[in-house]
Image: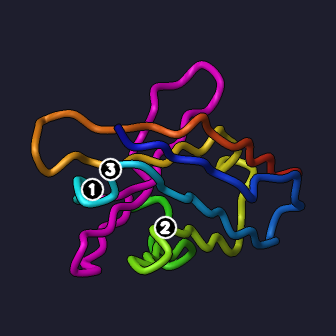
Protein backbone atom coordinates (compact mmCIF):
# COMPACT_ATOMS: atom_id res chain seq x y z
CA UNK A 1 0.00 0.00 0.00
CA UNK A 2 0.97 3.61 -0.56
CA UNK A 3 -0.19 6.47 1.63
CA UNK A 4 -0.42 10.00 0.23
CA UNK A 5 -0.79 13.08 2.40
CA UNK A 6 -1.49 16.44 0.79
CA UNK A 7 -0.92 19.83 2.36
CA UNK A 8 -0.83 23.47 1.38
CA UNK A 9 -4.41 24.20 0.51
CA UNK A 10 -5.73 27.58 1.62
CA UNK A 11 -7.94 30.56 0.87
CA UNK A 12 -6.19 32.96 -1.48
CA UNK A 13 -7.17 36.00 -3.52
CA UNK A 14 -7.35 35.89 -7.29
CA UNK A 15 -3.91 36.45 -8.79
CA UNK A 16 -2.20 34.89 -5.81
CA UNK A 17 -0.03 31.80 -5.51
CA UNK A 18 0.00 28.57 -3.54
CA UNK A 19 2.19 25.51 -3.39
CA UNK A 20 0.66 22.14 -2.68
CA UNK A 21 2.72 19.23 -1.41
CA UNK A 22 2.02 15.50 -1.44
CA UNK A 23 4.19 13.20 0.64
CA UNK A 24 4.17 9.50 -0.15
CA UNK A 25 4.97 6.66 2.22
CA UNK A 26 4.67 2.90 2.28
CA UNK A 27 5.49 0.91 -0.88
CA UNK A 28 7.40 3.78 -2.47
CA UNK A 29 9.14 1.51 -4.96
CA UNK A 30 5.77 0.71 -6.55
CA UNK A 31 5.00 4.33 -7.45
CA UNK A 32 5.10 5.26 -11.12
CA UNK A 33 3.42 8.40 -12.46
CA UNK A 34 2.23 10.90 -9.88
CA UNK A 35 -0.27 13.62 -10.45
CA UNK A 36 -2.67 16.20 -9.18
CA UNK A 37 -6.40 16.15 -9.84
CA UNK A 38 -9.12 18.51 -8.68
CA UNK A 39 -12.82 18.39 -8.10
CA UNK A 40 -15.00 21.46 -7.87
CA UNK A 41 -18.49 21.33 -6.31
CA UNK A 42 -20.96 19.69 -8.66
CA UNK A 43 -18.26 18.74 -11.17
CA UNK A 44 -16.31 15.63 -12.01
CA UNK A 45 -12.77 15.14 -10.85
CA UNK A 46 -10.36 16.34 -13.52
CA UNK A 47 -6.69 16.00 -14.29
CA UNK A 48 -4.52 18.99 -13.44
CA UNK A 49 -0.98 17.74 -14.05
CA UNK A 50 1.12 14.60 -14.02
CA UNK A 51 4.81 13.84 -13.73
CA UNK A 52 6.70 10.65 -14.47
CA UNK A 53 9.64 9.17 -12.59
CA UNK A 54 11.88 10.70 -15.27
CA UNK A 55 10.24 14.10 -14.61
CA UNK A 56 8.28 14.32 -17.83
CA UNK A 57 5.25 16.51 -17.25
CA UNK A 58 1.77 16.92 -18.66
CA UNK A 59 -0.76 19.68 -17.92
CA UNK A 60 -4.41 20.39 -18.47
CA UNK A 61 -4.87 23.22 -20.93
CA UNK A 62 -6.62 25.29 -18.27
CA UNK A 63 -3.50 25.46 -16.09
CA UNK A 64 -0.68 25.54 -18.65
CA UNK A 65 1.64 28.45 -18.02
CA UNK A 66 0.28 29.01 -14.51
CA UNK A 67 0.88 25.74 -12.65
CA UNK A 68 4.09 23.77 -12.34
CA UNK A 69 4.33 20.19 -11.12
CA UNK A 70 7.60 18.92 -9.71
CA UNK A 71 8.83 15.83 -7.97
CA UNK A 72 11.55 15.11 -5.44
CA UNK A 73 12.16 11.38 -5.67
CA UNK A 74 14.58 11.48 -2.73
CA UNK A 75 11.85 12.92 -0.51
CA UNK A 76 9.03 10.91 -2.11
CA UNK A 77 7.15 14.17 -2.55
CA UNK A 78 5.36 15.81 -5.45
CA UNK A 79 4.56 19.51 -5.55
CA UNK A 80 2.14 21.73 -7.42
CA UNK A 81 3.16 25.37 -7.67
CA UNK A 82 0.11 27.41 -8.60
CA UNK A 83 0.38 31.03 -9.73
CA UNK A 84 -2.04 33.57 -11.18
CA UNK A 85 -4.86 31.74 -9.44
CA UNK A 86 -8.40 32.28 -10.65
CA UNK A 87 -11.74 31.73 -8.90
CA UNK A 88 -12.37 28.82 -11.27
CA UNK A 89 -9.35 27.06 -9.76
CA UNK A 90 -11.37 26.63 -6.57
CA UNK A 91 -11.62 22.91 -5.83
CA UNK A 92 -10.44 20.09 -3.66
CA UNK A 93 -7.05 19.05 -4.99
CA UNK A 94 -6.12 15.38 -4.82
CA UNK A 95 -2.75 13.72 -5.17
CA UNK A 96 -2.59 10.48 -7.13
CA UNK A 97 0.11 7.85 -7.52
CA UNK A 98 -0.08 5.11 -10.11
CA UNK A 99 1.11 1.66 -9.16
CA UNK A 100 3.70 0.34 -11.63
CA UNK A 101 2.83 -3.28 -10.79
CA UNK A 102 -0.90 -3.07 -11.34
CA UNK A 103 -3.62 -1.02 -12.99
CA UNK A 104 -4.53 0.52 -9.67
CA UNK A 105 -3.59 3.84 -8.15
CA UNK A 106 -3.64 5.56 -4.81
CA UNK A 107 -5.33 8.77 -3.72
CA UNK A 108 -4.72 11.25 -0.97
CA UNK A 109 -7.47 12.71 1.17
CA UNK A 110 -7.52 16.02 -0.70
CA UNK A 111 -6.73 19.59 0.23
CA UNK A 112 -9.08 22.54 -0.30
CA UNK A 113 -8.03 25.45 -2.47
CA UNK A 114 -10.36 28.43 -2.51
CA UNK A 115 -9.69 31.44 -4.72
CA UNK A 116 -11.70 34.55 -3.95
CA UNK A 117 -12.44 37.21 -6.55
Identity of the residue drawn at 44% across and 71% down? 64
Report the residue marked by disc 3.
27
Q: Is residue 57 left or right of residue 43?
A: left
Q: How far is disc 1 from disc 3 in space, using C-alphas?
A: 7 Å
Find disc 2 in the rendering and name its residue.
78
| Farthest top residue in view | 42
Looking at marks 1 and 2 on the same chain, the residue that comes earlier in the sequence is marked by 1
Label 3's element? Answer: loop
**How many neighbours does mark 1 have within 10 angstroms: few (below 14), some (14-19), or many (20 or more)?**
many
Could you say which is closer to the camera, residue 84 or residue 58? 58
Foreground of the two, 102 or 29: 29
Which numbered disc, 3 or 2, marks the residue closer to the eye?
3
Residue at point 34%, 37% (across, down)? 1
Per the model, the C-alpha gap separating discs 3 and 2 is 16 Å
Q: Are marks 3 and 2 in contact (CB under 8 Å)?
A: no
Label 2 environment density (alpha carbons within 10 Å; few <14, some 14–19, many ≥20)? many
Number of residues whose C-alpha sits closer than 10 Å to that of mark 3, classed few (under 14), some (14–19) or many (20 or more) = few
Q: Nearer the viewer, residue 79 or 24?
A: 24
In this orientation, which residue lies closer to the viewer: 17 or 94?
94
- State the image coordinates of residue 31 (x, y, percent, origin top left): 27, 56
Please tell me which residue is depicted at 63% across the width and 51% down the height of the picture.
6
Q: Is residue 63 above or below residue 39?
A: below
Residue 52 spot, x, y in % from top left: 25, 69
Task: Find residue 8 and report its image quarter.
Answer: bottom right
Seen in the picture, residue 24 relative to 94 is either above or below; the reply is below
Q: Quadrant of residue 55?
A: bottom left
Q: Which mark is residue 31?
A: 1
Determine whether label 1 and label 2 are within 8 Å by CB.
Answer: no
Camera-nearest label, 1 or 2:
1
Q: Are marks 1 and 3 in contact (CB under 8 Å)?
A: yes
The stretch of residues the image draws in magenta is 33-60
Amino acid sequence: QVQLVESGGALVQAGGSLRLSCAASGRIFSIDVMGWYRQAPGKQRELVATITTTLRTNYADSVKGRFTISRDNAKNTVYLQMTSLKPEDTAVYYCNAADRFSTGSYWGQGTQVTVSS
